Image: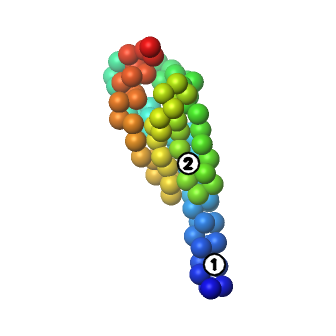
Amino acid sequence: MKKILLLLLIIAGICYYYNPPIEDHINFLSSQAPEKMSSEGNVAVKIQGNLDFINLYVASATKDKQRLSIVTFGVFKKVILIDKEWLEWVSKGRP
């Protein structure tokens, strides 16, 4: 039992060390932004203004302030896009 607990603590520590910060989420979303949004400039500022950052210590996520949907999820320095329509929705203008 002690070995399992020790193993879980080590895995949690590794996950915490490699937990992606908000900058990684914003950079990923900026790279995925449509051309219309990229041509307007200040993509990162527009994206960051519409997101809340959630730090789960072993993983991180961002959620939309208005729709309350999870936009990205990150673990082990990898960021995954969950809400694929969110970037288009922000680029068209929020209702």
The image quarter containing residue 35 is top left
Q: Is residue 43 above or below residue 57?
A: above
Residue 1 in the image: x percent, y percent? 62, 85
Does residue 40 appear anywhere in the picture?
Answer: no
Q: Which residue is mark 1?
A: 5
Residue kind at label 1, given as amino acid type: Leu
Can residue 14 be seen? yes
Where is residue 26 drawn, in percent x and y? Answer: 51, 35
Figure quadrant of residue 19: bottom right
Quarter in which the C terminus is drawn: top left
Q: Residues within 10 Å of mark 2 (few under 14, many from 20)?
A: many
Q: Secondary structure at mark 2?
A: strand
Residue depicted at 39% across the width and 36% down the height: 83
- Percent x, y of residue 14: 59, 65
The residue singled out by tag 2 in the image is 60
Residue drawn 63% across the image and 66% down it: 13
Residue type, label 2: Ser
- The local secondary structure at tag 1 comes to helix
